[in-house]
Image (spheres, rainbow, N blue to C red):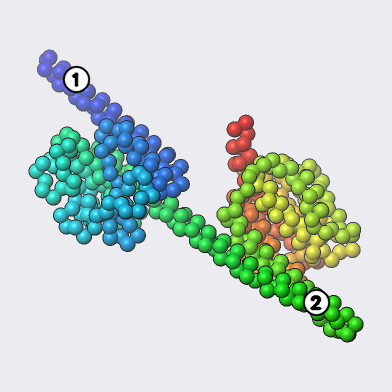
Amino acid sequence: MYGNENLNIEIQNKLIEELTLSNSELKLINSFAKDILESNTIQDILNTILKKFEFHNSYKYCSIYLLDDSKNNLILEEPPFFVKNKKSISITQQNNLLAIVANTGKHKIIGDLTKDIGSHNKTNNYNSQIVIPMLNKVNEVVGVFDFKHPEKNYFKKNHLDTLSTIASLIAAKIIQTKDVEKIKKYQKQLEDYVHVVSHDLKSPLRSINALISWIKEDNQDNFNETTLTNINLIDDILLQMENLIASILNYTKIDYEKSKKVDVDLNLLIHDIKKVVYIPQNISLKIPNKLPILYSEKTKIFQIFQNLISNAVKYNDKEKGEIVITFIETNSHYQFSVKDNGIGINEKYHNKIFEIFQSLETTKNSFGIGLSIVKKQVNWFHGEIWLESKENIGSTFFFTIKKEEQKNKKQLQ
């Protein structure tokens, strides 16, 4: 009888021990998932991994190897991460445990390193080893985890399950981060290229403009009316080209150019825009209800409203033109509208006008960039833009700005 009671107690203790262990491993996975998701660079990810494992009894003897761009070598990653000549292992080495795991994509567990002739980095300090492949979604190897422990036969199934899950999370994040870093690199190259090209294009334009001015001054009394008209036309074309270059430069900078967030009173912002955009006396700009104050990047908000108001003025053919700006507030967004009674836009062009270099009117000031800039800016704020329009009646452009940042600011306060 007493023997059965002792057996039951042993079973209960064993179950409690296993549940405690499972709970501990689950907490570790959740902790990794949270911190890895918040990492923005490869170095951040590696730092997070090593620091977390450093204070964990089971996993503190950890080494991380990532495959290089050639996919032929495993590179040991350890602080400082910027060192160029890092320790590397060719994955063609048939007697190397790390190379075998990298090639096969399958884990390896060594219970007794003293008996395993082919184990990697065998020393008297460690007796157990587990090597886990870091696999992405399509089971491609990104790198390997190498864990050792002083105790023999230390690593069990629970360790394998935990480390495999963490390895998958890290592999996915590393792939994602590498893609983002590549995009940022290409964006920087594009920015440098656009700056060089814009400078190279503007210089001859300004030289031509100066030459035209000198020719006009030297031949004021010699040119007839037709020649003067043509020379003035050249001046206008040069100005168009310079404005076009500036617009392209602005368009390419939107995705990566950030400015400080401030409180933006949209009522004052519209007042400032009226100083920049020429609004004829026959066109009225109305704001029926007071607009909100946003915590945002002022330059981007300014460009959205400036372009929409400028278009509403430019394409208004009515004797009494009207522009009306309104907004409504939803749970997740602010929704704004800019309405005019201008020429309107045929429904078949409603999507086309937001594409770069797609202009429906061939006027000297129309490059087909303004609305594409507006769309990119709205996307930046995690919003959407659309329009309702009828020819000869007018257009209403709607756009939204996500309220998440407004909430974040209130929480900080």
Query: What is the quadrant of residue 319 in the picture?
Result: bottom right
Q: Which mark is residue 92?
A: none
**Residue type, numbered disc 2:** Trp
Q: Is residue 7 visible?
A: yes
Which residue is depicted at the point 52% across and 62% down? 189
Find numbered disc 2 in the image and state the secondary structure of the residue it sits on.
helix
- Residue 169: x and y in percent read 36, 46
Which residue is depicted at the point 42% across and 39% down? 35
**Residue 273 in the figure: left or right of residue 184:** right
- Disc 2 or 1, which lies upstream in sequence? 1
- Residue 37: x and y in percent read 44, 43
Which residue is depicted at the point 70% across and 54% down? 304
Q: Which residue is mark 2?
A: 214
Q: Which mark is residue 9?
A: 1
Q: Is residue 173 visible?
A: no
* Nearest the eye: 318 or 90: 90
Query: What is the quadrant of residue 13 in the picture?
Result: top left
Question: Where is the N terminus found, in terms of image quarters?
Answer: top left
**Residue 381 in the figure: left or right of residue 157:** right
Question: Where is the C terminus found, in terms of image quarters?
Answer: top right
Which residue is depicted at the point 76% across and 61% down? 311
- Mark 1: few, some, or many residues within 10 Å (few <14, many ≥20)? few
* Nearest the eye: 383 or 192: 192
11 relative to 318, above or below: above
- Residue 108: x and y in percent read 20, 47
